[in-house]
């Protein structure tokens, strides 16, 4: 039985030939590819076959494709093709010599890029998708499909490159495993990271925000004030006919038909060592959806005998007689006294603040003290201009069981969560009313300074904190609309009003208990003025824009 051995040589004329030697298996020695001296080749060699040194040797012409390739090149080329197509599908096919397939994959890539561009064409659209459960689900499906496409492209490029070259046994298995590990990382890591953020975000918005649709929700609130109403007939004053139970219908946008969108921001003091929730911070943000003009109305915690909406309350005064920051606790104690679409506590706070300001409260969001600290820390701190040094010799810590000395120097300061909360919370050296100013400045600073890099790096922790410490009745389907509203808002020109004594003081309580009673009619008149004519309100009421209150005068 004969076998075939092959070798390569050149003639004097530079023509390449393949030597085929027929010999018995196991007996002849392998031809090692040595060049045949020119003297042993006939000048009359012709293409086809030429006899050489006996009947068992045949010389045949060799094509360019049969030029020997080094084993190192043969082993690395498939991996190079796989890596290339893992990064950009189709480039590996070009390396493997399959240009036609490479161009086909490039066309698919172009289609994918068009879809991605349309889905994430600008910042607002991108953020809107990130707060929509349906969009998050679509993005996860797309993420998995894209991973599968890249894996297939890399594998296809590897096989094509492997099949076109000579089979070379790779002795360095460590290099093979290392190449495979790097390839898997290149393929999987981007999709794993994207999937992580997608899942965390989906869990966050479905855990915190209401699943109830924003359309058709009933809100017990006073009707918005209109131009021309005066202090003698304020919109939504206690006992007036303007208090109604209304049904807000939406036709795709949450503020359709609304002149103002009003959201109540609450700072709840319900950390360790405290009984019940005291709503020490109550700031209503009122936004004109058409123009983006915004106003902030701060209600102090120590007003008493606040008016109640019709159908609420169990008190003879038709008001809530105690401190207004105890409303959440009142809802828990007297659930039947605060009917409405939400929990009794939610109905109590939204209803009373609505009557106090004379505007409907559409949504609320509450964060507790511990959550505030963690949120600021997750954002990398907040930079605040401190107009004068703040000192508190006995500042109560977040745990509610210990005290410490706090000193925050005047000037621009970078505060962590603990100090930012202390700055917004302390009132030892001044009063509740100075504290309200600081609270507004801290909120504004956080809104302006939220760093995308810090958000991304601390997203998991931030999501956990929000889930544990935030409650709201904002529906999920309203979140994209809130996002689309952001570019129109002018945060630097927000008009801010504090309804504090003595300007809004009407009288002291007549039952001998401590507490002030607010001039609610005057409150309504000024809210109406700020909403309808903010420039006139600034001039007549001596108001300041938030930037003037919180900014560094030396920087302007």
Image (cartoon, helix red, strand yellow):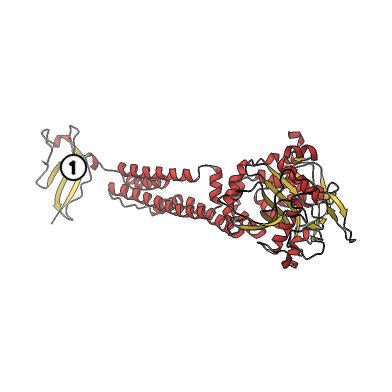
The total of numbered circles placed on residues is 1
Where, by quadrant of the figure, is residue 26 drawn?
A: bottom left
Front-lying residue, 268 or 215: 215
Q: Nearer the viewer, residue 401 or 159?
A: 401
Task: Indicate the position of residue 437 as horizontal and vertical percent values.
Answer: 77, 46
Q: Residue at x 73, y 62 (%)?
A: 311
Circle 1 is placed at which residue position? 18
Q: Is label 1 in a helix, a strand or a loop? A: strand
Measured as percent of width and height from the top left, residue 148 is found at: 41, 53
**Image coordinates for residue 206, horizontal then vertical, percent:** 57, 59
For the residue pair 473 and 222, the one nearer the viewer reads as 222
**In this picture, is 123 found above or below 336?**
above
Q: Residue furthest left?
A: 55
Closer to the camera, 334 or 492? 334
* Residue 95 visible: no
Is residue 318 among the parts visible in the rendering? yes
Q: Is residue 447 left or right of residue 234?
A: left
């Amino acid at each position: 039985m004969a076998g075939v051995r092959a070798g390569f040589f050149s003639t004097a004329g530079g023509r390449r030939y393949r030597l085929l030697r027929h010999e018995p298996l196991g007996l002849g020695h392998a031809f090692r590819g040595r060049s045949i001296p020119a003297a042993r080749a006939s000048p009359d060699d012709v293409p086809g076959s030429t006899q050489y040194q006996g009947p068992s040797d045949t010389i045949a012409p060799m094509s360019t494709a049969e030029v020997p390739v080094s084993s190192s090149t043969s082993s690395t080329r498939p991996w190079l093709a796989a890596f290339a197509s893992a990064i950009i599908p189709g480039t590996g096919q070009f390396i493997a010599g399959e240009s036609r397939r490479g161009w086909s994959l490039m066309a698919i890539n172009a289609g994918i890029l068009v879809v991605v561009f349309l889905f994430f064409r600008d910042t607002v659209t991108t953020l809107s998708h990130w707060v929509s459960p349906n969009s998050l689900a679509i993005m996860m499906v797309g993420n998995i499909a894209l991973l599968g496409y890249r894996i297939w492209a890399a594998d296809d490029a590897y096989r094509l490159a492997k099949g076109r070259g000579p089979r070379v046994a790779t002795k360095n298995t460590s290099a093979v495993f290392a190449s495979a590990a790097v390839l898997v990382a290149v393929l999987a890591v981007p999709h794993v990271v994207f999937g992580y953020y997608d899942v965390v975000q989906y869990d966050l918005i479905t855990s915190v925000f209401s699943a109830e649709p924003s359309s058709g929700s009933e809100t017990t609130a006073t009707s918005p004030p209109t131009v021309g109403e005066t202090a003698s007939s304020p919109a939504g004053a206690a006992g007036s006919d303007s208090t109604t139970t209304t049904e807000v219908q939406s036709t795709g946008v949450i503020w359709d038909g609304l002149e103002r969108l009003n959201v109540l921001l609450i700072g709840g003091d319900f950390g360790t060592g405290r009984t019940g929730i005291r709503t020490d911070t109550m700031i209503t943000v009122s936004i004109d959806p058409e123009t983006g003009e915004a106003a902030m109305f701060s209600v102090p915690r120590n007003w008493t005998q606040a008016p109640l909406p019709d159908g609420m309350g169990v008190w003879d005064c038709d008001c809530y007689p105690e401190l207004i920051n105890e409303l959440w606790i009142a809802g828990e104690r007297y659930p039947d006294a605060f009917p409405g679409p939400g929990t009794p506590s939610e109905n109590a706070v939204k209803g009373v603040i609505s009557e106090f300001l004379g505007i409907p409260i559409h949504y609320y969001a509450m964060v507790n003290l511990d959550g505030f600290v963690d949120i600021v820390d997750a954002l990398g701190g907040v930079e605040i201009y401190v107009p004068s040094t703040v000192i508190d010799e006995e500042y109560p810590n977040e745990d509610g069981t210990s005290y410490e000395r706090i000193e925050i120097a005047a000037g621009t300061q970078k505060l962590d969560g603990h100090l930012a909360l202390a700055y917004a919370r302390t009132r030892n050296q001044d009063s509740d009313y100075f504290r309200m100013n600081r609270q507004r400045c801290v909120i504004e600073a956080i809104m302006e300074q939220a760093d995308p890099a810090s958000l991304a790096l601390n997203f998991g922790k931030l999501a956990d904190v929000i889930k544990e410490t935030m409650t709201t009745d904002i529906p999920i389907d309203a979140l994209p609309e809130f996002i689309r509203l952001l570019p129109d808002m002018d945060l630097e020109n927000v008009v801010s009003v504090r309804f504090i004594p003595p300007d809004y003081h009407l009288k002291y309580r007549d039952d001998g208990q401590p507490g002030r009673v607010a001039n609610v009619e005057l409150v309504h008149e000024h809210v109406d003025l700020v909403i309808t004519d903010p420039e006139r309100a600034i001039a007549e009421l001596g108001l300041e824009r938030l930037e003037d209150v919180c900014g560094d005068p030396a920087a302007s």
